[in-house]
Amino acid sequence: MADTDASALPNLLLGLYGGLTRDPPWEGFLEDLAAAAQASFATLIIATGRTGIDALVTPGVDPVRAGEYESLSDADPFVDLPEGQVMSYQDFVSHVPSRFKDWMDSTGSAQILGVDLQAPSGASFRLRITRYQNLPDFSERESALIASLVPHLRVALELHARLTTTQAERQIFSSAMAGLAVATLVLGRDGRIMRRNATAERLLREGIVIMERQGRLEPQAGAGVTMLARLLASPPPPGEETAFDMAAPDGSSLRGRALSLPISAYGDGAFIALFLSDPNRSDRLDPATLRHRFQLTPAEAALAVQLARGISLIDASQRLDIAHNTARAHLRAIFAKTGTHRQAELVHMIRTAAASA
């Protein structure tokens, strides 16, 4: 590779790795690459399968032209290149579909160099540099420049896949957290509330057990203040959780669990997650509510409430004055209607429903 290209490499790598977090990704990298290769423009295509385009980034190109390419991408013959090898359009393509040739002629896209990389997930990373037809053909200089980037492109593709997965998991977690009937709070190291779901918001507004003061979580009882300070100073080890009770001045309490958050899970200082539930709220859920929510029979709903109160199946059958085998039959029906498979799972579902009642 020529000295001028070698000197351009650090700046290209800075744009490549720095562009991972941009939306769309790698615009600066592609602009720098086009300049270094004396190309008219550079394009990055992230695709699932042969034609399913997830992202197409071509800085400086008319968005209409980019949209036209996406609509014609199934006719593009310059795909499925030998993995990791820099290829020219002229050397690889023997037949060009007429509608794609018309588009190339209209855009003046005569000279193309490209490389394809495959991720373990099946996604492909297609890098293309293009010169207009009034410019000289690409030479070995440009091919060598692209080849020198291939190892780094592999790393960037893997990092992009991991970041995309992490972002998707974070969105799923955030969506699930918002819908939980259990109060869920994500706190920073200083107790600042980074996120809260609707149930937590209700508890904060009530101000009986917890409240928000200057953006931070503040338990209303002294024991709760001490407990929270201890959790923030010494959070549970990764993969473990700490159970606790959050007392209120009137003697009532919420049952809680605390989990440490991986440093990489959030980029805004989130540190620990708290899940708070009221064990007494299951008493507020009557059989009629369960019947309506899960389409249970009166006998099944009565048994479900007993189980939610922590009563064993044998004791529940005695309280309801039914045979143990009958109670077991009811339990099987409840499992089927609620989509649960174990008694503990059922109890958690019922108590969660009670917390939102």
Image: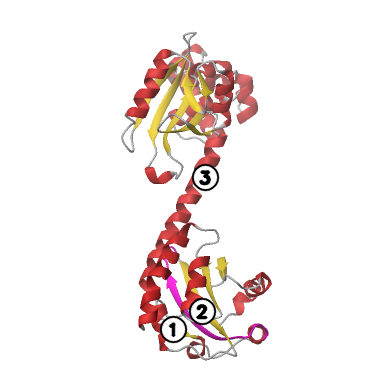
Q: State how far apart marks 2 and 1 are (Cα).
A: 9 Å
328 falls in the magenta region: no
* Residue under numbered circle 2: 129
Numbered circle sitting on residue 172: 3
Asked if labels 1 and 2 touch by Cβ distance under 8 angstroms, the answer is yes
Q: Where is mark 1, residue-wise?
A: 142
Q: Amino acid at mark 1?
A: Glu
Task: Point out the frontmost of discs 3 and 1.
Answer: 1
Q: Position of residue 20 (x, y in %)?
A: 46, 60
- Residue 196 x/y as whole percent: 53, 32
Q: Position of residue 249 (x, y in %)?
A: 48, 10
Q: Secondary structure at mark 2?
A: strand
How busy is the neighbourhood of tag 1: few (under 14 within 10 Å), some, or many (20 plus)? many
Answer with mark 3 or mark 2, whichever residue precedes in sequence.
2
Query: Is 28 placed above or below 139 here?
Result: above
Majority secondary structure of the magenta segment? strand
The residue sitting at 53% across, 15% down in the picture is: 208
In the picture, the quarter occupied by the N terminus is: bottom left
Residue shown at the point (42%, 80%) measured from the top left: 82
Above or below for 278 versus 155: above
Q: CA distance from mark 3 to mark 1?
A: 43 Å
| Residue 180 in view in this figure | yes
Q: How is the image coloured?
A: secondary structure
Label 1 near label 3: C-beta < 8 Å?
Answer: no
The range drawn in magenta is 106-121
* Residue at (53% x, 20% y) in the render: 305
Task: Looking at the picture, tell me which residue is in the foreground, 100 or 62.
Answer: 62
Q: 183 or 145, which is in the foreground? A: 145
251 lies above or below 278:
above
Q: Quadrant of the C terminus?
A: top right
